[in-house]
Image (cartoon, helix red, strand yellow):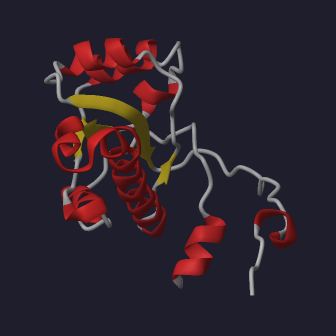
Amino acid sequence: MNILEVIKKRRSIRKFQEKNIPKEVVDKLAEAVIWAPSAGNLQSRKFYFVFNQKIKEELGNAALGQSFISQAPLVIVGCTDDRVFKQYRDRGKDLYAICDVATAIENLMLLAFEQGLGSVWVGKFEEKEVAKILDLPKNLRPVVIIPIGYPAEKPEIPPRLPKDKAITIIK
């Protein structure tokens, strides 16, 4: 598949097969996150690859009962690193670091789909609870939880805004 085809075909998956992800695929997912673009190349992000079932269940509870999280063989938590504040001040901490995580997660989700995996962006969770579960240092802030696994569902294509509503061309 070409990249635009991958972008258009990827769907949010919340039901997973009981099937482990091979180590070589997990290694590719790790490569996808570390090669994402980053503001000033500061790479103000950290990712936790969670395979531990008890911790996945705790993350599902911290995500206000989204139990499908614990059913995925792999759950990735993306965190910002506020040490970017030193170079970019509040804009770095409040925006650039979040963008750094988001670009890495987009890489991750597209590569996961290309590898036959499904994923979903989970943003609804109690940050302090996730930080406690993962024993995060003070400089890290969890901003996204991504369950990943082999899909056990095939969701319909969601509606998209037409180009003329989403894009303004300035000549």
The residue sitting at 50% across, 20% down in the picture is 67
Q: Residue at x 24, y 64 (%)?
A: 40
| Residue 1 x %, y % | 53, 83
Q: Is residue 116 above or below residue 146?
A: below
Question: Residue 13 location, x and y as percent?
Answer: 58, 45
Picture quarter containing residue 157?
bottom right
Q: Is residue 133 above or below residue 7?
A: above
Please state which of residues 121 and 12 is positioned toward the viewer in this rendering: 121
Apparent side of residue 161 relative to residue 28 in the rendered image (left or right): right
Q: Using residue 96 as the reference point, say whether residue 153 is left or right of it.
A: right
Question: At 43% across and 15% down in the image, what residue appears?
Answer: 126
* Residue 27 seen: yes
Residue 77, can we see it?
no
Identify whether 52 is placed above or below 74: above
Image quadrant where one finds the C terminus: bottom right
Instruction: Please state the horizontal and vertical placement of residue 31, each as a whole percent of the image.
Output: 22, 64
Residue name at image x 43 percent, y 39 percent: 147
Judge left or right: residue 97 versus residue 61: left
Q: Using the image as rendered, state which of residue 130 and residue 167 is in the foreground.
A: 167
Q: Between 102 and 74, which is closer to the camera in this rendering?
A: 102
Instruction: Measuring from the top left, give residue 76's x and y in whole percent.
Output: 32, 40
What number of labels is visible?
0
Q: Residue 95's image quarter?
A: top left
Taking the image as shown, residue 2 lies to the left or right of residue 111, namely: right
